[in-house]
Image (tube, rainbow, N blue to C red):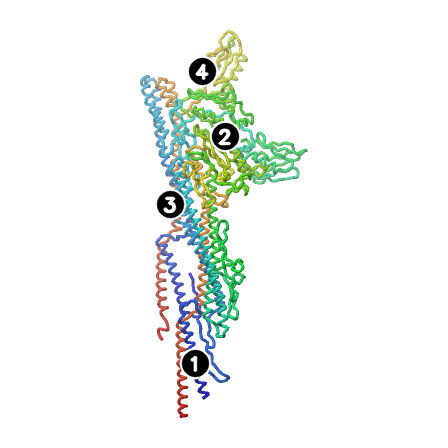
Amino acid sequence: MGVTPVNLARISFNLRAFNLQEALRANQTSLYSVQNQLSTGLRFLRPSEDPLSASKTVSLDGYIDQLSEVQNNLSNVNACLLETESAMQEAVDLVREAYTVSLETVDDTHSAEEREALAVVVNSLLDQLVSVGNRKYLNTYLFAGQGADAPFSFDFDGVYYTGDDQRRTTVVDTDMSTDYFTATGTEFFQAASTRVRGAVDLNPALNAETLITDLRGTSGEGVTLGRIQVTAGTETTTIDLSGAATVGDLVDRLNAEMPTGLSASVGTTGITIVQTTLPPTTVAISDISGGQTARDLGLNVSFAVVAQAGGDLDPKLTLRTEIDDLLAGSGINPAGGLTIRNGSQVVTVNLTGVDTVEELLNRINQTGLGVSASIADDDRRLEILSVVSGTELSIEENGGNVATTLGLRSMYGGTYLSELNDGNGVDTVDGDDLRITTRDGTVVDVDLSNARTLQDVITLINTAGAGAVTASFVTTGNGLLLTDETAGGGTFQIEALNGSGAMIDLGLDVTATGNQLTGDDVNKVITDSAFTALLELREGLETDDRQLISTASQRLDRVLAEMQTVQGRMASQAQMMDLRAERVEAETDAAQILRSDVTDVDYTDAVVRFQQLQTALQANLQTASMVLNLSLLDFL
Amino acid sequence: MAIMGASFEIGRSALTAYQAAISVVGQNIANVGNSDYARQSAHLAARSTGSTATGVEVNALQRHVDEALEARLRSSLGQRSGAETIHTTLSSIESLYNELSDTDLSTQLSEFFGSFAQLQTDPLEYASRELVISSADAVIRTLQQQRSGLLTEIEDLNSSARDMAETANGLAEQIADLNQRIVTAEGSGTGQSSSLRDQRDACLRELAELVDIQTRQYDNGVINVYVGSEPLVDFGHSRGLTTETITEDGLERVSVRFADNNGTVIMSDGRLAATLEARDTYVVDQLNQLDTLAQAIIYEVNRVHSQGCGLVAYESQTSTFAMADVTVALDTTDAGLTYPVQNGTFQVRIRDKFTGQVTTKMIEVDLDGLNGDDTTLTALAVDLNAVPGLSATITSGQKLKLDVTDGYEFSFAEDTSGVLAALGLGNFFEGTNATTMDVRSDIRNNPQLIATSLSGAQGDGSNAGDLAAVGTTASDLLGSLSITDYQEAITNRLAIDTAAAETEYIAADAVYSSLTAQRQSISGVDLDEEAINLTMYERAFEGASRFLTVVNTLTAELLTLVE
């Protein structure tokens, strides 16, 4: 407030009044300010009263708001995790009970009737397990992944999973980092099969439309765009490639800015640089210090030839990838399509006219067979998984080679013998395993001890057959095919030697039709889930099939361990969320204390100031009345 | 008798002089409460004819005024009132923003982005979607209230400027008139015309409070007044002040002109100059910052929103923003898009509602400036038309309209070009500033359209998570500050400006108080002093009266001798 200097020659009446007014104004303003502080408990009500503290307060308020949101999220998530833990425990208990039933009934202590009666119990356990699988917390189906509907249903002669394998996530910290809070049906119940994972890297060819973000680049870690330097003879240019979205954009930019006489084009695997002015000069392409664009594009080269191919940019397989670009541009021959058999249902997928990977996957997914076709996580292969528990899936050829080319045939040359028969493998013996007798009486003995894959089996039979017998895969369906290349009046047949189980395990325990022995599919895909085990156990008890009960028992043992692992993981996730919630609460308290330090008034200080100001005001009023009332006129 | 006559004359002169002096004291006492009044004092001088004393006379009435001090006072008055105006304006903006309360913009922005975080956890929860809309509405409402408050502030400042210019014009005319009257009054040789001069000083002070003026005083009593380097009052003539209203960027702005030639009045201090400065420097600046903030919120939210898909997708959509020219590249000025577009791509997903099958098509937005084939809206429509099931047309309003075959729906994804946000497709907000900002009407009607999912799965809330992070992510539109940081910066800047304006006002007020005190010290009336003078002149008058009585007695006695 205004301060009137005191070194004045004379004090007029107006000056005296003015001075008192100014002093009173200053007093009243200060008093008003302290009174406000006392009545609100705040040091300042407007940012301009203390801009620095106000700025801190606004920041702290934002931070406290964020903390509150996170706290809110964590509280919701914790409730959901609690529900998940309880559902998981229920599921584990149900599976454990079923496992006990399987152990009790697998031996001779129960009669067929008793087993049949226990099938009802198992059926009830199955119903309960499906019900647990469809457990919900508010709007969230706990095991549906990111699906919005109940994930499990009895369909396709088994238990059908319609959820996905993506967990639900939430913001767990003020830096907006996220973490998951659900376990999917595929991870806890193992509701999707682990096969068929594609066997072939579909290696798409590069084209102008390929996105830069879909390139692995020569480093395998993607392509970072920046500036490169291109020198041709004496001319050097610096080219900024950072605005490019597609490979076509890169080539356009290079062609627009490279030195005269150079031209870029899109090759099958990378970018090719061609010298259009002959004879060729020395061309050097390099990164500008700190950059890695030329390296990532495989263009950090120096050459004096007409055409120089850049490195393999290794594009990812995407939904948009053209079928014709697959296999380095070879594409696939769609003739025959592929056959998918899941349980009792069979569909042959016609792939004629399919242009992109997405269309191909759509055609497979829309078969309505309880399969899920997608691009594998490595972005190189396709995969078709069964999401039905209790059925067997096979992917077969239908006279062509589509399934094999796409690496999707469920029984193929690369299949390990150990994988066959639901993982039970092939039981070979020392010495010969098979004897094949052709129609002309030629006897071919085959020793399969060294065979690891089905292709090994085919090679060993072909070698041992020496032209009399040839082995291959059937062209329609799945299975081995033995062909008698001889002619004669005998019977083409196969038998096991030395007690080997290989013939049965390879699906060759069959009778010949003419000169052909057509083997069975012994590598059907079974979803290794608790539901499959319960369905098997129920069937085993109903039909008094102790082998099936034993299979179910082993499966239950296996899945129970896996379920408990996931249960443990979710328990630790819940603990982690709890710890986060505690930390966030502590941070909120700390932030509130800090805010209080910044904004709240120090009452002792404020009260003392109030009293001081009150005293000053009183003094001011008293002196004012005295000074203004004193006049010489009173004495005249 | 000549001696007697002279004595009578001496006594008469003394009586007249002291009567006059007492009148001056009376005048001073009468004006003791008049702060414009400059005290006067009667200057007494002995009269004489040759070597003969002939009494006393009031030869001058002295006005106690320090002209240099008056000029400084006027200047400080202008500075004080200017600083006060700036401070008042900034304080009222601060009140309008109401920052530090529970309903301020920063809290509402936190709640808005926080509502997306909540939606990420449970994208299927309808109430959470409604919460996003209501939080967005709160942000919009506050931005609009603040914007309309700023516009009202501008109107008020314009209106004040008009009134002040009119007042200043009246004062200039009064000063010109007083100049003439002073010359006339003082030309008659009766000394300074104090009351006229007091009136003129008051007018000058009043004028200086509005406009920073310089004055030049002439010997004949005239004061010429200058504003900047231009004369306003020249002797008895005022050039006059008037105002002109122009509309610029949709805002009305009043400016002050000389009435005679419509020339610009250059002012640097005073209430009027400060009013215009407060308008142009602070309020318009705040308005622009508010619009920039609104634009950034609209664009950044739209940019992320257009990458995702809601619980349901679109069956038809018309772009929010119209183009000026659909045949030029999208990133050119002629295209008329408010928001930036760059070379990139985006995807359109067509979903069969019956089977759930999705077909994805990539659309290139070629804006590399090469080969003469940069994407125009027409070209974009052609590309989108080529997507099976999708039909793209350009409306008569230069907007892009997308429709999909019955039984299908569409959404967008992975837009690296920003074209969707720039055109207003798959967007959350519409509008280009705080006034026009609104939640897209189809989203308001159906919150299920809020794009929470990136993958298309209904339970996927990852795009909601991305939307929650928009508030704290750096934006190119805000010079790499985040929306939250920018809003905080606006508040902080305003707080600092207001605090600085208050400090400036306090400083100017201190100078003014000090100068006023000095003026009062020189020109103010002191009752005690006047009482002493009064007593002194009274006694002098009594003395003169006694002297006349003595002279009269002597004269009578002398006449007795004659008898």
Residue under label 2: B388
Q: Is residue A127 left or right of residue A261?
A: left
Distance from disc 1 to disc 4, alpha carbons, whole Å, reads 154 Å
> If the image is split into quadrants, where does the N terminus of chain B sit?
bottom left
The nearer-to-camera label among 4 and 2 is 2
Whichever of callouts 3 and 4 sits on the residue coming sooner in the sequence is 4
Distance from disc 3 to disc 1, alpha carbons, whole Å, reads 88 Å
- The amino acid marked with disc number 2 is Pro
Label drawn at residue A504: 4
Q: Position of residue A14 (x, y in %)?
A: 41, 68
Distance from disc 4 to disc 2, alpha carbons, whole Å, reads 51 Å
Callouts 3 and 1 in the same chain: no
Residue under label 1: B14
Q: Is residue B305 above or below residue B44?
A: above
> If the image is split into quadrants, where does the C terminus of chain B sit?
bottom left
Task: Kindly identify which chain the residue marked by label 1 belongs to.
Answer: B
- The amino acid marked with disc number 1 is Ala
**In front of the other: B174 or B74:** B174
Residue A452 seen in render? no
Callouts 4 and 2 in the same chain: no
